[in-house]
Amino acid sequence: MGIFEIKAGIFSVGALHWDRRLFDELIPLPDGTTYNAYLVKGSGKTALIDTVDPEKVQDLIDHLNELKIKKIDYLIANHAEQDHSGSLARMLELFPAAKVVTNAKCRDFLKDLLLIPEDKFITVQDRETLSLGSYTLEFILTPWVHWPETMVTYLREEKILFSCDFFGSHLAASRLFTEEEEIVIRSAKRYFAEIMMPFRSSIRTNLEKLDGIPISMIAPSHGPVYTRPDFVIRAYKDWTSDQVKNEVLLPYVSMHGSTARMAGYFTEALMRRNITVKPFNLTKTDLGELAINLVDAATIVLGTPMVLAGPHPAAVYAAFLVNALRPKTKFLSLIGSFGWGGRLAETITGMLTNLKAEVLPQVLVKGYPKADGLKALDQLADQILLKHQELKIT
Ligand code: FEO
């Protein structure tokens, strides 16, 4: 990433990972990512806020060397996940007098995951402050903004919020600051969908906690820095709300064309009713695209053929993921085709129990869809329209 001086004595010293394509061996990263770390030099003490993924530790070391940093007093750990904490041990080797400053839960994770000894820690409470001389850091506990120990660090004098995963985006970019908000907000939404959505209600609580704090800039540990933080805070309030949109998400898989024909017919049936529909062929879809569209959709209709007496494994994988991501979906249904028999609907609906969604009648046809099957799809589209009208979102 190079070094950026954000304000006097406050530097971005983290690393870009342009070609990382998978996070947690699960999440696609079409735009790479960044691990932002921030050096804050006060008149008395120096702190490093978060580190970088261990794979990129040399970038961090090079940046600190370039700034001729001989002493770091505090290593602030906002989050124990290794993409931010994984270089702490190396930092402690280079700066043996430094203390790791974090909350009790994060301290315990770091002892457990990274084997950092107890005497290296300074443990802080919610809203506790740490003086660097000319700068003051305040620690605000924001549990479950990914893991249970997550916190953010607020630099009082400059009103900068170092938010770690909160408001982050997996987006490698050569500029530090958000200039193209449309692009950044899409990456931030994708990030929210993949990382934050399961913790929607905790995030809502934490947004309320931040409400009274004046923020001039949000400096997350992934993606660009927000110089106009309002727009991402507003977006988070929308994404975490219970408000849904007049949209149907239609992930489907088809082996011999019957379920694909149903998905195609159903897509047009919804379009004729002015419902936004997003069909995703599961064999060709980036799962991140599926996730981002889960954020707002009122309804999910999953399409799958019967295979080996149950749903297609691609549909099972999608259902498992949707259930884990816990979107605010209000309605759920299933369409598909079978040859003889099996347990398709029971298996899929049994996998989606995290969703607080009303299950609408499914449309399962024998073989290729015929007139009565297509009519049933029209009836399902009518029912979805009615449900969306009741929510006043059409
Ligand atoms: Fe970027 Fe939850 O770590």
Image (cartoon, grey):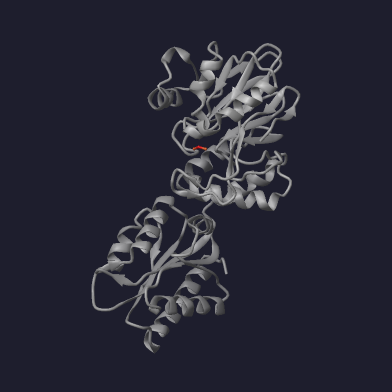
Residue at figure coordinates x 65%, y 48% from the top left: 184
Position above or below: 132 against 259: above
Residue 58: x %, y % from top left = 58, 28
Picture quadrant of residue 356: bottom left
Picture quadrant of residue 8: top right
Residue at figure coordinates x 34%, y 56% from the top left: 353
Q: Which residue lies furthest to the right in this view?
A: 8
Residue 386: x %, y % from top left = 49, 73
Position above or below: 106 against 372: above
Residue at figure coordinates x 45%, y 81% from the top left: 378
Which of these two is toward me, 309 or 135? 309
Residue 392: x %, y % from top left = 56, 66
Q: If the image is split into quadrants, where does the C terminus sit?
A: bottom right
Count of residue discs: 0
Which of these two is toward me, 169 or 199? 169
Residue 156: x %, y % from top left = 67, 24
Residue 102 appears in the rendering: no
In the rendered view, does 284 fall on the left or right side of 1? left
Picture quadrant of residue 312: bottom left
Position above or below: 374 against 113: below
In the rendered view, does 382 fall on the left or right side of 172? left
Which of these two is toward me, 10 or 139? 10
In the rendered view, does 279 fall on the left or right side of 255? right
Residue 330 appears in the rendering: yes
Q: If the image is split into quadrants, where does the N terminus sit?
A: top right
Which of these two is toward me, 206 or 290? 290
Residue at figure coordinates x 64%, y 47% from the top left: 234
Position above or below: 234 against 159: below
